[in-house]
Image: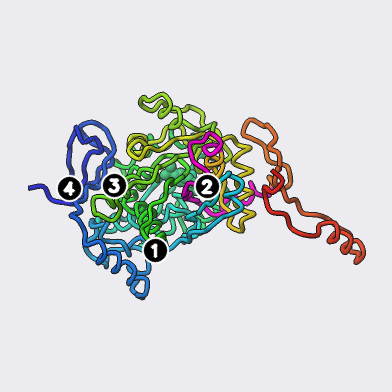
Amino acid sequence: MVRFPHLACFDARCGQRYGLHEIVYACGKCGNLLEVANRFEQFDTSKIRNAWQQRRLSLAKVDVSGVWRYREMLPFVTSDEEIVTLPEGNTPLFDAPAAAAYAGLDSLQFKHQGYNPTASFKDNGMTAGVTQAKILGARRVACVSTGNTSASMAAYAAAAGMQAVIFLPAGKIAYGKLAQALEYGALTIQVEANFDQILALVRELAEDLGIYLLNSINPFRIEGQKSIVIELLDQRGWSVPDWIVLPGGNLGNVSALGKGLRELRTAGLIESFPRVAVIQAAGSAPFVRQMRENRDLRPVRNPETLATAVRIGNPVSWRKAEQAVQSTGGRAEAVTEQAIADAKAIVGRCGIGCEPASATTLAGIRNLVRARTISPSADVTAILTGHLLKDPDYAYRYHTGQLQTPSGEPIRAEFGNAPVSVPHDRAKIAELLERHAGGTAPGSDR
Ligand SMILES: *Cc1c(COP(=O)(O)O)cnc(C)c1O
């Protein structure tokens, strides 16, 4: 008899299985990624929804967490004592009428994962990954990161009393993220190579050095990230949107979204799927090409984008992502650097704000509405993946007209808002305020 949960090769035709406590990141037989195979009998749906709602009133740490509140969906943890939480999740769902207008939609919601303890969605996965590290008795955890994974891992490792080892592509990381890793006490190693090259190296090293790897190849991180869509649907009273839109880098997040949706349906908590759209930066869009050409992923050798969180040319989770998009009738779409920058400014004008990678969503939605793939009346939710303050340098440069694409093309500050200088003079200040009287809604001129 097969015991659940266990680790299983993502390729069902291969069928290879591993125990939950074996340290493996890829199938030894065919090389594919692994996933945690759960078995969800049909839940008593009203009972479970009620229990999840009741836990919002509880003061217990595992109930306060917006990941572990849904622990029936994460059965690899058997004791609350093992859980490492900061606590994460509980991120808001915003209505963003100005962003909706910009995209050509009647309405648009943002689920903002930047409201996590280290300010990105990586915390949803990291609480589960570090919990598994603790279950395994690991002393040392490591990751290669474009920034947010390292910030998150450093924080959770510190909370769990483990050493964090971080490998970063030299010079290609936003300062907000690097500052976090340093502050949380991680051993931070900058390598003169890009993300894809370093990951390949560290995968080899991990085994030799007895380090537990917490990149998104780690199936337990994906388990934690499933909670984003569970919480989203819970917040919407279990009403499934027409579209869920999110950025794609290494494609772990869309993989988690796909798995979460599948399992929610098996458990009887939803009856239909939203269509899933993955947005990539045009200079770093191997998945968009894969979906268009309908063939296996071909890596982009020199991925370029200012949205450093999605600057990944050889995403490991492309098979899982493909399944998430295909099984929901979804889409993959690329957007330009200019479009990302403008969309980001619009998200800011909603009083919300996000980091560049997150803004790909609004830019992508705008394209898909124009192409009539998304109907203007569609019910659309976008996942904002990281906080505005992760990359303040980008925001400052945009608003002051100094932002340039990686190849040195100027980015126009279409929605720029540069600071204004004025002498220490009452009349001059009054005159200035007169000139800037009244606010205009963003995008109202177009
Ligand atoms: C990691 C990250 C992404 C990309 O997510 P993947 O799971 O790698 O596709 C997008 N935005 C932000 C802010 C991130 O930190």
Q: Is residue 245 above or below residue 227?
A: above
> Over which residues does the magenta segment extend?
367-396
* Dot 2 beta carbon under 8 Å from ligand 1: yes
The residue beneath circle 4 is 19
Per the model, the C-alpha gap separating discs 2 and 3 is 24 Å
**Type of residue at label 4?**
Gly
In the displayed structure, does residue 302 sit left or right of residue 226?
A: right
The residue beneath circle 2 is 358
* Dot 3 beta carbon under 8 Å from ligand 1: no
392 falls in the magenta region: yes
- The local crowd at label 1, few if under 14, some if 14 to 19, many if 20 or more residues have their Cα within 10 Å, is some
Per the model, the C-alpha gap separating discs 1 and 4 is 27 Å
Position in image of residue 205 (x %, y %): 34, 39
In front: label 3 or label 4: 3
Q: Which mark is residue 262?
A: 3
Per the model, the C-alpha gap separating discs 3 and 4 is 22 Å
Residue at the image point whose x is 26% and y is 32% from the top: 31
Per the model, the C-alpha gap separating discs 4 and 2 is 36 Å
- The local crowd at label 3, few if under 14, some if 14 to 19, many if 20 or more residues have their Cα within 10 Å, is some
Q: Is label 1 in contact with label 4 (beta carbons under 8 Å)? A: no
The residue beneath circle 1 is 159
Q: Is disc 4 placed on a helix, strand or loop?
A: loop
- The local crowd at label 2, few if under 14, some if 14 to 19, many if 20 or more residues have their Cα within 10 Å, is many
Q: Is disc 1 placed on a helix, strand or loop?
A: helix
